[in-house]
Image (cartoon, helix red, strand yellow):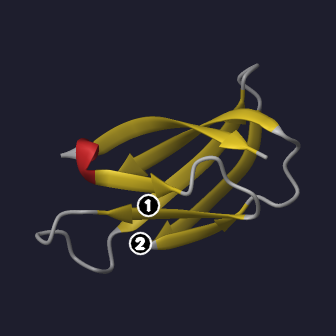
């Protein structure tokens, strides 16, 4: 399920880690990751295999929403950038 995705640390300074927590997932699962500001503007978009390390150092401080698209569905997590 999409609830088994971990996004950390939160709050984040420079690197955001995203990984699936289930052992049944293949290690090469592709994730489409998009980060939006509180106004709904996309700030970052990337496609990577999990676990993923996203460089968010250039984002301004504030609240962001991380949209993760997986083969099993989508999930949105809220993060705070220091």
In the rendered structure, are the residues bearing label 1 and label 2 in contact, judged by CB atoms less than 8 Å apart? yes
Q: How crowded is mark 2: few (under 14 residues within 10 Å), some or many (20 or more)?
A: some
Nearer the camera: disc 1 or disc 2 = 2
x then y, percent, for residue 42 = 73, 37
Q: Is residue 52 above or below residue 32?
A: below
Q: Is residue 5 above or below residue 42?
A: below
Q: Residue at x 84, y 49 (%)?
A: 59
x then y, percent, for residue 31 = 44, 60
Residue 59, numbered circle: none
**Residue nearest the viewer, comparing 52 with 10:** 10
x then y, percent, for residue 81 = 74, 45
Q: Which residue is drawn at 64% across and 47% down?
A: 11
Callout 2 secondary element: loop
Residue at the far bottom: name it. Answer: 27
Q: Which residue is drawn at 25% across and 51% down?
A: 4
Q: Looking at the image, can residue 40 be seen?
A: yes
x then y, percent, for residue 47 = 55, 64
Which residue position holds label 2? 50
Which residue position holds label 1? 31
Asked if residue 22 lies left or right of residue 7, the reply is: left
Q: Which residue is drawn at 26% across and 44% down?
A: 2
Q: In this view, does 49 lie above or below 66?
A: below
Q: How crowded is mark 1: few (under 14 residues within 10 Å), some or many (20 or more)?
A: many
Q: How many labels does the image show?
A: 2
Q: Which of marks 1 and 2 is nearer the N terminus?
A: 1
């Amino acid at each position: 399920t999409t609830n088994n995705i971990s996004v950390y640390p939160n709050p984040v300074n420079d690197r955001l880690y995203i990984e699936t927590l289930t052992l049944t997932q293949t290690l090469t699962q592709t994730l489409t990751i998009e980060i939006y500001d509180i106004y709904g503007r996309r700030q970052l978009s990337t496609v990577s295999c999990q676990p993923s390390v996203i460089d968010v150092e250039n984002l301004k401080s504030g609240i962001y929403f991380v949209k993760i698209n997986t083969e099993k569905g989508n999930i949105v997590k809220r993060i705070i950038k220091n």
